[in-house]
Amino acid sequence: METYRATSDTIVCTLTTDELRDTRSAWQKLFRTALLSREEIPGGIRLVVNDGSAEALGRLIEIERDCCRWITFELDGPSVSMSAEGEGASAIRSMWVVGPA
């Protein structure tokens, strides 16, 4: 398991509008094709994708680690837990929502 601790307390995303749109689209594609479970955990959520999509999940987490430094990520193959203190927990839960197909 790889743990990437939050390095900021400020809840902000540093992606440009275009980068945010592209990243959101990639998350939704992953959700539609590979998501096995999404559960709330203390301080955030845990996502699990099928084993064949672990690499894609890892690439998305690399992007998120750079733009959302207020989140702690625990990546374990096809599973990631994302958590934050205070208001960050509800922000995480509202950001990673499975959208309509």
Image (cartoon, rainbow, N blue to C red):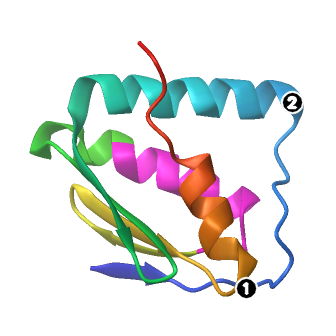
- Residue found at x 48% / y 34%: 27
- Residue found at x 81% / y 24%: 18
- Could you classify mark 2 by the number of other residues whose Cα lies within 10 Å: few (under 14), some (14-19), or many (20 or more)? few
Residue 49 image position (x, y, % from top left): 22, 45
Query: Which residue is situated farthest in the top direction here?
Result: 101
Give the residue type that dot 1 points to: Thr
Which mark, residue 51?
Answer: none
Q: Secondary structure at mark 1?
A: loop
Residue at numbered disc 1 = 7
Give the residue type that dot 2 points to: Thr
- In magenta segment, residue 16: no
| 33 versus 41 height, above or below | above
Q: Is residue 65 visible?
A: no
The residue stretch that appears in magenta: 57-71
- Residue found at x 50% / y 41%: 97
The one of 101 and 25 positioned closer to us in this rendering: 101
Q: Is residue 22 visible?
A: yes
Residue 74 image position (x, y, % from top left): 39, 76
Q: In which image quadrant can residue 47 be found?
A: bottom left
Residue 24 image position (x, y, % from top left): 61, 32
The answer to the question of whether label 1 and label 2 lie on touching residues, with beta carbons closer than 8 A, is no
Residue at numbered disc 2 = 17
- In magenta segment, residue 58: yes
